[in-house]
Image (tube, rainbow, N blue to C red):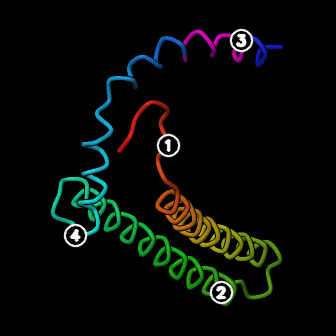
Amino acid sequence: MYMLHVFANVGPIVMQVLPIFMHIDVKSIAAACNDQKNETGVFGQLITLAGSIQTGLRNVGIAVFVIGVVIAGMMRMLAFGSDRRVMFSNMALTGSCIGLAIVLLASGIETFLCTQIQSTSIAIPGVTL
């Protein structure tokens, strides 16, 4: 019931925000997108910065996975047959694997979306580039 109320209120908000987008200079955005290829423009520098941040976060995620696997292995070796400690080592290993899966899925989704966005053309009614 609450969701229907929220969706009913979205229409008037969109109608108020829509005129803002009519004042965007599409030609300057297209020029900025063209600068991305040679990375001389501000847009290209932002893309480079975002790519560096993404690579850094992915590397940190993989490093955390490796550390988690090593810790889980050490917990398993030092369990000395205790079922409770073996269970905790299994949980640590499972958490590490889930974390790695999240990092790799996020990277794959980002790559897929960027490929799709770059392959589509901008079609705005009434505006010619």
The residue that mark 3 highlights is 8
Sequence-wise, which precedes: disc 4 or disc 1? 4
Q: Earlier in the sequence, mark 2 or mark 3?
A: 3
Left or right: residue 115 versus residue 54 is: right
- Label 4 to label 3: alpha-carbon separation: 45 Å
Secondary structure of the residue carrying numbered label 1: loop
Foreground pick, 8 / 95? 8
Mark 2 and mark 4: span between their CA atoms? 54 Å
Q: Please, what is the three-letter code of the amino acid marked with disc 1?
A: Ala
Magenta-highlighted stretch: main secondary structure? helix
Q: Are marks 4 and 3 in contact (CB under 8 Å)?
A: no
Mark 3 crowd level (few <14, some 14–19, many ≥20, 10 Å Cα): few
Residue at left offset 71%, top offset 72%: 94
In the image, the segment drawn in magenta is 6-14
Which callout, 4 or 3, points at the residue further toward the start of the chain? 3
Q: Residues within 10 Å of mark 2 (few under 14, many from 20)?
A: few
| Residue 27 as seen in the image, left or right of residue 104 | left
Q: Look at 66% across and 74% down and name the residue there.
A: 97
Of labels 2 and 4, the one closer to you: 4
- Distance, label 1 to label 3, CA atoms, is 28 Å
**Mark 2, residue position:** 78
Which residue: 28% across, 62% down?
36
Q: Mark 2 falls on what kind of element?
A: loop
Q: Can you identify the residue that label 4 sits on?
A: 38
Residue 69 location, quadrant: bottom right
Helix, strand or loop at mark 4? helix
User: Mark 1 or mark 3: which is in front?
Assistant: 1
The residue type indicated by label 4 comes to Asn
Q: Residue at x 25, y 51 (%)?
A: 31
Instruction: Give the mark toward the camera: 4 or 1.
Output: 1
8 drawn magenta: yes
What residue does disc 1 label?
123
